[in-house]
Amino acid sequence: MVKVDISLVVPVFNEDEVIAKTHDRLIKVIDSLELSFELIYVNDGSRDATASIIRSFCSSDKRVKMISFSRNFGHQTAITAGMDHAAGAAIIIIDADLQDPPELIPKMLDLWQQGYQVVYGRRISRRGETWFKRTTAKFYYRTLKRLTDVSIPVDVGDFRLIDACVRDALLKVPEHNRYVRGLISWLGYKQTFVDYVRDPRQAGNSKYPLSKMLRLAADGITSFSYKPLKLGISIGLLLSAFSLVLAFAVFISRLFDLVWMEPGYASMMCVILFFFGVVLIILGIMGEYIARIFEEVKDRPLYIICDKEGSFQQPSREKSVDTESTLPVDQA
Ligand code: UDP
Ligand code: MG
């Protein structure tokens, strides 16, 4: 077996427009360093030419490998599978769209060699992202920080380096609703940051539509905070107190014949609808948690691998399925 110093993990989902460019830039950085690398692409159920392009990289360069899922399992699961299979003493996760500059890798490796086990890429600014995405991301990371007890760093994404020992610890975390950046903060270890400017996506469109983004955001909060569940108690107590005050005011006004509140159907409807809304929102929050508990209890495999390109030294995690189809994935 060839000894691997560093594993690069790249999740890909329908990235045929950008993957060749990304590959070139990654190889340039790898070749400039005196370390042995493996480059693991995790094909998260791509339906375009991504798999065949990567397969051609694999056949011309033995350092390049690919894991293909049987369908789209999502970005967080893809990076989990990549880390699970990485053989390097350090593992670097990087997006396929060149939003995270590969040229930062040597700086991350420097910090790792200085003894840090987790090196996060921290976005100091996001060029080329919409106002909506920038604002919601900023608001979300700060809300998450306020809600959770685990100190999840603000403005870090999934561009990071972890030592193999952190990955080994992560293998022991079986949860299905994975918010990997939170899990890594939760694990602890010696952590640091490198700041960078997030570039615009180099080609293709974002593979994170609003629905996936909301799901990831909800996973982040529900995995690390119980505070939303307690919202019902606080609102309930507040409303009960308010209703007592109101009842007292009504009683006094009747006693002294003061007319200060006209009976009104419209205003009544507003109040009723508002509070029904509040009750349903709280039920919905509970539903979010219950759905996640249900998913964890079912304990299905985290991902299903249908094809692998290249040899992997690291076995899959216990809760995953590894079956290789005889057909190439593009035809399967
Ligand atoms: N990705 C993935 N599975 C998905 C969605 C995205 O593997 O279901 C990959 C995608 O190919 C890219 C990375 O995750 O390499 C980040 O996705 P994207 O750049 O579309 O997200 P954004 O930067 O817009 O948040
Ligand atoms: Mg991107």
Image (cartoon, rainbow, N blue to C red):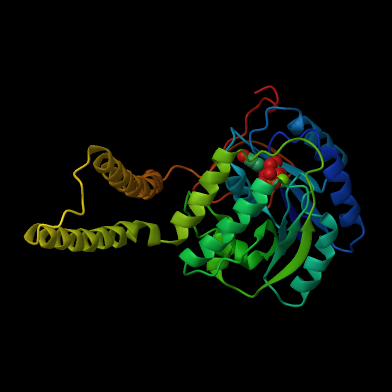
Which residue is at the front of the view, 140 or 286? 140
Callout count: 0
Q: Identify the residue at horizontal 18%, vertical 44% (top origin).
A: 263
Q: Quadrant of the N terminus?
A: bottom right
Question: Picture quarter containing residue 165?
Answer: bottom right
Residue at the spot x=88%, y=49% of the render? 25
Q: Residue 67, how many percent across, how many down? A: 67, 41
In the image, residue 82 lies at what x, y percent?
A: 66, 49
Ligand 1 sits in quadrant: top right
**The C terminus: image quadrant:** top right
Residue 226 visible in this rendered orientation of the protein = no
Placement of 125 over or under 190, stated as above or below: above
Which residue: 25% across, 62% down?
A: 237
Residue 27 seen by the camera: yes
Return the residue found at the far left. Answer: 255
Q: Is residue 43 above or below residue 127?
A: above
Residue 257: image quadrant is bottom left
Rendering quarter of residue 284 = top left
- x and y percentages locating residue 201 in the rendered image: 78, 44
The residue shown at (58%, 60%) is 141
Camera-side residue of 164 and 217:
217
